[in-house]
Image (tube, coloured by chain):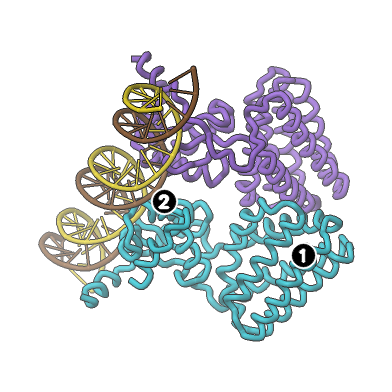
Chain colours: A cyan, B purple, C yellow, D brown
Amino acid sequence: MTSAEGLHAARSRGRNTRQLVHEVLRSRIVGLELEPGSAVSENDLAAELGVSRTPVRESLILLADEGLVDIYPQMGTFVSRIRERDVASAQFIREALECAALREAVGKAGARDVAELRVLLTAQEEADRQSDMEGFFQLDEEFHARLMAVSGHASAWPVVSQAKAQLDRARRLSLPMTQQMSLLIGQHREVVDLLEAGDLDRADASLRSHLRLVFSDVEKIRAKHPELFSDEDAPLRPRRDSARRTAARGDR
Amino acid sequence: MTSAEGLHAARSRGRNTRQLVHEVLRSRIVGLELEPGSAVSENDLAAELGVSRTPVRESLILLADEGLVDIYPQMGTFVSRIRERDVASAQFIREALECAALREAVGKAGARDVAELRVLLTAQEEADRQSDMEGFFQLDEEFHARLMAVSGHASAWPVVSQAKAQLDRARRLSLPMTQQMSLLIGQHREVVDLLEAGDLDRADASLRSHLRLVFSDVEKIRAKHPELFSDEDAPLRPRRDSARRTAARGDR
DNA sequence: GTCGGTCGGCTACCATACAAGTACGTCAGC
DNA sequence: GCTGACGTACTTGTATGGTAGCCGACCGAC
């Protein structure tokens, strides 16, 4: 109910309802506001957001293509559980693309590029001081995106971003440990330093180990929150939530 | 009219209408049956395929996400022209992922893996002898997919495939020169040989130059068929085809 | 008590209707 | 002949109705 009106209010900026719904849902899923395994019904979402089923449905199809939801025809749509295979695949994609871009960036990077990266670093430190986790996540995303932009392959970022989404869902659970943030920022700084110095191989190794650290976090999370993960390849019975209906009645 | 009935006939195999339409359209676009710049109207396609606008529209949204069509609200949907930037981006993605996978495959590859790859090589040679271009394209795709599968990252293939689609549209025009096929097959063989020998760096270099050759083909095509390419970043007036309506009348 | 059939309610899928907006041909005015 | 306003026909976007299919609870038979 809270965001029902806000959706159409922001519609003026050239984006249509489908894109807005898509962004909202993606944000909720990646931010774990919608937990893996939970049902996302076309009808419920349409009612909540104050739009028709069509843009909601189209958004869900896109999210399914990104691997963030699983659509079971005539059964329901569910936020996908984190699959070992998908996480490993996402890590592989991210590492390959970001490191390849970095290797090309070395040499290309001008003083202006480095300066802009350092601005992001100080902003990250500020977010760390204020324990602003959400802000740090956003700055982290921006840092990695800009790093790819320096190489001239900014248009490849959406692919990385999509892979990153799979990893981020799990990371949200781990990062509350704030000492992690300063560690990550230190690694960011090391990458920028080596980039500026033009040390190709060490920059590559530095970024790679940074990304691997993020990856290892996910594995730790798996031990803590197994319910968010899926061991099976095809958990073909997502189990419909039969309690929802009675709860809705109680609400009235 | 020809494929109108065939669509629903093949529907039994678990795939819904949306997926079928998506496959048909993707195939037509990548196979250049639908040329870059041509209009793809939701209504026309729905009528031709004998379905409603809904699955057609949803397919187009997915194709837009893949970068194969451009949707201009209230104006029309058009097969995207080949953009310099997109091609370069696709090449970067493909090269980074395939080479990274190959590096991991070296050492992992068993005798069985190598044998299966060689089966594909002989099949490619057979396609070459028969000048079966379409068959070669399919075998080429399968070869590269299996190469990634050896590394254990088969699930990353769809990403490569999507990038590859941008390149393939242009390649279709160049490959009629059949001497190219034997050259490409030779490079494939070299990669397999080096993979089997466990020579990581040379295998990487070999695959990379192979992919670069494909990339350079695209640039040659640009000179021959500039109308398929787009110089501008935002060619915001795709020009509606006003002759279509009168032609449709003449058809009746 | 346990098993098997039935039935209600939910789901996503597809089809259709309406709305908002753009391009292009036409025609009046100059 | 040229220019500019207008209207029609088209486009995609959104809303809504109807259908097939699946789940899960209920209930009767054994």
Q: Quadrant of residue A214?
A: bottom right
Assess whether mark 1 and mark 2 are in contact (beta carbons under 8 angstroms): no
Which amino acid type is shown beneath numbered disc 2?
Answer: Glu
Residue drawn at x 31%, y 59% as measured from the top left? A43
In x, y percent, where is residue B78?
A: 51, 35
Which amino acid type is shown beneath numbered disc 1?
Answer: Arg
Cα–Cα span, label 2 and label 1: 36 Å
Q: What chain letter is assigned to the residue under label 1?
A: A
Instruction: Decide which of B173, A85 is in the foreground and name it.
Output: B173
Q: Quadrant of the N terminus of chain B?
A: top left
Return the residue at label 2. Answer: A58
Circle on res. A136: none
Task: Tell me if A118 is positioned left or right of A232 in this view.
Answer: right
Instruction: Decide which of A210, A16 is in the foreground and name it.
Output: A16
In x, y percent, where is residue A177?
A: 63, 84
Residue drawn at x 84%, y 58% as measured from the top left? A106
Q: Quadrant of residue A10?
A: bottom left
Residue drawn at x 44%, y 21% as measured from the top left? B243
In x, y percent, where is residue B148?
A: 70, 47
Does residue B167 appear in this view? Answer: yes
Element under disc 1? helix
Q: What chain letter is assigned to the residue under label 2?
A: A
Callout 2 crowding tier (Cα within 10 Å): few <14, some 14–19, many ≥20: many
Element under disc 2? helix
Return the residue at label 1. Answer: A208
